[in-house]
Amino acid sequence: MKSKKIGNNILCAATWTAAIFTIGILLFLVGYILVKGIPHIKPSLFALKYTSDNVSVVPAILTTVYMTLGSLIISVPLGIFTAIYLVEYAKRGNKIVGLIRVTAETLAGIPSIVYGLFGMLFFVTYLGLGFSVIAGSLTLAIMILPLIMRTTEEALKSVPDSFREGSFGLGAGRLRTVLKIVLPSAVPGILSGVILAIGRIVGETAALIYTAGTVAQVPSGLTDSARTLSVHMYALSSEGLHTNEAYATAVILLVLVIGINALAATAAKKLTKGK
């Protein structure tokens, strides 16, 4: 009994140590970025046009928004519909379902630069889209599709079977049950996957350098080359001429990610309360 108590205390101490260490690293990184970047955030940094003298972040912010929306429009419906089929319609033990899940898990672990090379060879070169917003969006959509599909699948699985049985007992069909009962109950979990996908899109650099390019201007169309905030920050730091502005861009990127996550969390809470 005494040895068991000692073991529990050791595990508890190890858990608290790991948690404190993780939180400490997070606070250090955030604090370092804020200290190095906030002093260099100036009004000129938010000019509409990028020049060699004024490395504005506005084109990069707009491109990040365009790229995020384009990728989500493609990947979210496809990922959700695929997960619905796997959980609600496919027979359990189906070999094809198992193959799809293994493939999705494999794709989720592939390095982003591999996606970038694929996007450059297929979208940029073979399809002739060139370095463009649409090529970058398609590449990112393929990259985040496994993540959205797997998180949606787990969210659907977490809905109790009693919900489905009650709906069937009242005479509702499978489609109505999925749309009216199962899917609304799984919305918080689905949004969690979307939030993770947005974080990966906003922070992606390697894949976009090979597909969207690095032109620091506001894109006038889907076929124009442009750079996101992460690519903008990478370009400034690699050039070595605007290191201070790169730190300022990192602060803006951090605020943007936190803001998107906060909005998504608020939307999830409202949807949950409204059920």
Image: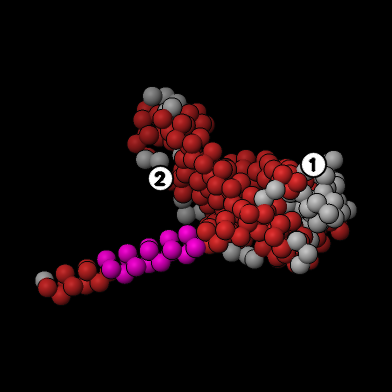
Does the stretch in magenta take in 139? no
Does the stretch in magenta take in 20? yes
210 displayed left or right of 230 = right
Residue 158 is labelled as 2
Q: Position of residue 95 (x, y in %)?
A: 53, 57
Task: Give the residue drawn at x 82%, y 49%.
Answer: 50
Q: Residue furthest right?
A: 128
Q: Amino acid at mark 1?
A: Leu
Q: Position of residue 242 (x, y in %)?
A: 75, 61
Give the extent of the magenta segment.
12-28
Q: How is the image coloured?
A: secondary structure
Please state which of residues 11 and 41 is positioned toward the viewer in this rendering.
41
Mark 1 against mark 2, which lies toward the viewer? 1
Q: Residue furthest top?
A: 170
First of labels 1, 2 by sequence position: 1
Residue labelled with disc 1:
48
Q: Residue furthest left?
A: 1
Task: Give the residue drawn at x 37%, y 28%.
Answer: 169
Q: Main secondary structure of the magenta part?
A: helix
Please state which of residues 53 and 102 is positioned toward the viewer in this rendering.
53
Q: Secondary structure at mark 1?
A: loop
Residue 152 is labelled as none
User: Which of the 4 quarters of the picture holds residue 53?
Assistant: bottom right
Dot 2 alpha-carbon crowd within 10 angstroms: few under 14, some 14 to 19, many 20 or more: few
Q: Secondary structure at mark 2?
A: loop
Marks 1 and 2 sit apart, C-alpha to C-alpha, by: 46 Å
Q: Position of residue 47 (x, y in %)?
A: 78, 43
Q: Position of residue 2 (x, y in %)?
A: 12, 73
Task: Give the residue drawn at x 85%, y 40%.
Answer: 220
Which part of the image, by quadrant, shows the C terminus? top left
Please state which of residues 141 and 12 is positioned toward the viewer in this rendering.
12
